[in-house]
């Protein structure tokens, strides 16, 4: 481990925010046109969760049987806590998505792919969680205090349209 990375030991989860091309149907354009807008490291990641509501289908004449089929999938809001990243880049993304930016560009075109890299202690990637078409729904800076040794981002909440596990 090099000395620069030793400073990031408490920030075990590396996060990469990339902008990719979005097709006409709203789907990601794949990995070909990715542009990294920010990288960071966070000490806590919660909300890597997907659930599916089962659909029940009743069959006429079968009073004791209900068929179960896959229904709509939903995803929890992912929360990144206590992180180090280029705050100005993430704040610009927040401002664009929330409408606080004077830029006239479409917020949909700035949804990002977010990759959360989980590594072993020797920094070998164990696996990567990918969030498709993520957008920030809450941005929280730490309290400002002259004596505090706070980190750059207290919380970043992300809503997304898909959770995938990528193996290195």
Image (cartoon, rainbow, N blue to C red):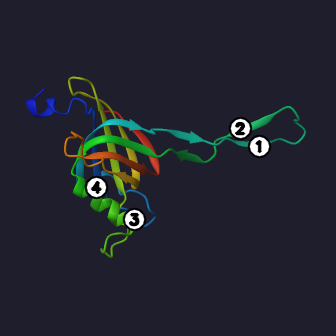
Looking at the rendered structure, the secondary structure element under dot 4 is helix
Q: Do the residues labelled 1 and 4 touch (CB within 8 Å)?
A: no
Farthest residue toward the right? Answer: 61
Q: Label for residue 90?
A: 4
Looking at the rendered structure, the secondary structure element under dot 1 is strand
Give the residue at mark 3. Answer: 98
Disc 2 and disc 4: Cα gap in Å? 42 Å
Residue 57 % position (x, y): 77, 43
Between 153 and 11, which is closer to the camera in this rendering?
Answer: 153
Between 28 and 153, which is closer to the camera in this rendering?
Answer: 153
Mark 3 or mark 1, which has the lower sequence index?
A: 1
Q: In which quarter of the image is the C terminus?
A: top left
Please indicate whether residue 108 sits to the left or right of residue 125 in the image: right
Give the residue at mark 1. Answer: 57
Q: Are marks 3 and 1 in contact (CB under 8 Å)?
A: no
Give the residue at mark 2. Answer: 68
Q: In this view, does 156 lie above or below 109?
A: above
């Amino acid at each position: 481990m090099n000395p620069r990375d030793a400073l990031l030991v408490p920030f075990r989860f590396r996060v990469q925010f990339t902008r990719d091309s979005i097709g006409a149907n709203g789907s990601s354009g794949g990995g070909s046109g990715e542009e990294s807008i920010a990288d960071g490291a966070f000490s806590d990641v919660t909300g890597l969760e997907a659930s599916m509501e089962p659909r029940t289908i009743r069959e006429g004449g079968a009073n004791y049987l209900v068929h179960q089929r896959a229904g709509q999938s939903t995803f929890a809001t992912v929360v990144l806590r206590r992180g180090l990243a280029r705050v100005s880049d993430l704040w610009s993304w927040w401002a664009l998505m929330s409408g606080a930016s004077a830029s006239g560009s479409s917020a949909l075109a700035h949804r990002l792919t977010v990759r959360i890299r989980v590594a072993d202690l020797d920094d070998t990637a164990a696996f990567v969680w990918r969030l498709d078409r993520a957008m920030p729904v809450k941005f929280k800076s730490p309290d400002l205090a002259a004596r505090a040794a706070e980190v750059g981002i207290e919380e970043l909440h992300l809503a997304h349209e898909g959770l995938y596990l990528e193996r290195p």
